[in-house]
Amino acid sequence: MQVKTMGISQEISFRLERLILDGGLAPGQKVPSERQLATRLGVSRAIIREALHELQGRGVINTQHGRGSFVANIVPSTNDDNSPLMHLFAGHPRTLYDLLEVREQLEGQAAELAAQRATHGDRHRITKAYQALEETDPLSNARPDHGFHQAIVEASHNPILVHVLNGLKNMMLLTVHASVANLNPRADMRELIMKQHKQIYQAVMAGKAASARKVAMAHVRFVQDSLRGLESQGAEVIRVPLYSDNFHENPTKRY
Amino acid sequence: MQVKTMGISQEISFRLERLILDGGLAPGQKVPSERQLATRLGVSRAIIREALHELQGRGVINTQHGRGSFVANIVPSTNDDNSPLMHLFAGHPRTLYDLLEVREQLEGQAAELAAQRATHGDRHRITKAYQALEETDPLSNARPDHGFHQAIVEASHNPILVHVLNGLKNMMLLTVHASVANLNPRADMRELIMKQHKQIYQAVMAGKAASARKVAMAHVRFVQDSLRGLESQGAEVIRVPLYSDNFHENPTKRY
DNA sequence: ATAGCCAACTGGTCAGACCAGTTTGTGGAT
DNA sequence: ATCCACAAACTGGTCTGACCAGTTGGCTAT
């Protein structure tokens, strides 16, 4: 109905963004002061501030008290690295564990279904992925790991499950790839993880559905606990801001 | 360069975002009015507006003149109506059961977590939703049913779970006759479903996590089996999308 | 020349007012 | 009794002017 209408503040933010992106303002350059913009554009300073906050939320500029606003170093990438979700992870590390909590369920289900439904072709692909996993040095990269899990998920023959888990995994890869790399270097952990992979592989191939679910869930939970352990040791899993929260009641006890 | 300082408006936007993440505000839900937030948080309305603009720029919320601000759907993969996933439903009713298969897991997990983590406020909301569910004639509409499940999912305090399940639910609404609409007309089934709801409600409220998971999963599985039964009798389960219920008018649209 | 201070920037916050859409409930007309 | 219209009472949108709080640079006093 009313989609046409766009507030002045929106229009201002668009004009500023276009000005910046068109090269009128280069990255690092200082944006005119709020009062200047207000008089020059013929609007109140409040509007300018709202528009600037919008750009700030988009990551186009950053603002410093007493100094001014500056054009951020933005790579006009079409990647969704700047998606709202990414910001959520950056600001709220708990979300990572929420993610793993859900993954624990779905990976377990995937393994269970895979054990039940895997075809000959599936088994072949899973075996190939597992062998690649064994032969590759986990230190180099996590792709074999990715491939192994992927093969199992696909063997579940549930496209919804594949889709959802793929989405969750992408989220993780984009935000915590460093931490995954942090996990493997420790010899003891690496050995444990490889043992878990072996258990998953064997259970799925043997068609032991319940067992497959169990070990797959244990695997995710292990990763989860390990990350938490790393974090408690001061490792930088993801950026951690510290803020108190008395705005809304907190859940009784998390984790 | 003391980077530590963060303005009130930043903190407000952070807290609001956190509130949304915690499931206190689910996608599509209305954010409290600016004046309410201002008084509740003890800051001026200008600050609230700046914080909201920041979230808006980030795509977390969208705002409509005269109506309010609403939480946007921030998990794109499972909510995108144009997703290739939607095309799967076209000719493959089986996908519906894949969906329910996944839902079985996640609803179970949601109930389990809700039983563990529900706050006083959560319990109040769940109780209210359950009472509405009891009093309403299920034949009229499915809103109370949705509200009840939604309340439980939100009480899990896992934003990822909330968003994923919300996406799956939307998918179902878009493609399937609401299960209750199909199932309830039969007196025996309706009674069974209401009994299951009661079990879920009691288990969650009693904090019996394992039991809550069990009955919630059984509920989804029952719906699943029932639909399959109906379908085998020749009933039309899958339908063409006709809902335009979604109002994602994206204000960040250029031009 | 330099240490120190102060004025003039900058953004941050507040208060209250008014405009502009939306929703809702109540009234009257039917 | 039903239904339509219109007036509150919401909601967000904008403006004004004031004051607080960091930063910067220049000007004094040493």
Image (spheres, coloured by chain):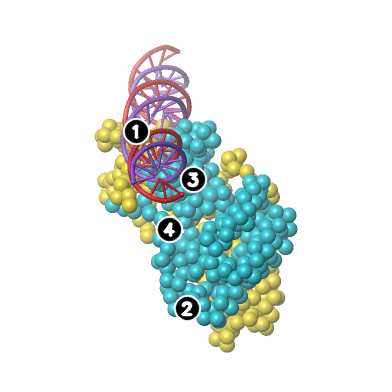
Chain colours: A yellow, B cyan, C purple, D red
Q: Identify the subunit bearing mark 1.
A: A
Amino acid marked by disc 1: Arg
Disc 4 or 3, which lies upstream in sequence? 3
Identify whether A37 is placed above or below A240: above
Residue A185 x %, y %: 62, 64
Residues under numbered marks 2 and 1 in contact, where contact means CB atoms less than 8 Å apart? no
Amino acid marked by disc 3: Val
Amino acid marked by disc 2: His
Residue B176 x %, y %: 49, 70
Circle 3: element type: strand
- Could one spot residue B39 in this view of the protein? yes
Residues under numbered marks 3 and 1 in contact, where contact means CB atoms less than 8 Å apart? no
Circle 1: element type: helix
The mark closer to the camera, 3 or 1, is 3
Q: Is residue A253 left or right of residue A145?
A: right
Same subunit under labels 1 and 4?
Answer: no
Residue linked to disc 4? B246
Residue linked to disc 1? A45
Residue at figure coordinates x 67%, y 46% from the top left:
B120
Amino acid marked by disc 4: Asn
Q: Is residue A126 left or right of residue B199?
A: left
Identify whether A67 is placed above or below A58: above
Residue linked to disc 3? B31
Tell me the crowding category of disc 3: few under 14, some 14 to 19, or many 20 or more residues within 10 angstroms, Cα based: many
Residue A1 x %, y %: 33, 52
Residues under numbered marks 4 and 2 in contact, where contact means CB atoms less than 8 Å apart? no
Tell me the crowding category of disc 4: few under 14, some 14 to 19, or many 20 or more residues within 10 angstroms, Cα based: few
Circle 2: element type: loop
Residue linked to disc 2? B92
Q: Identify the subunit bearing mark 3.
A: B
Residue A101 x %, y %: 62, 61
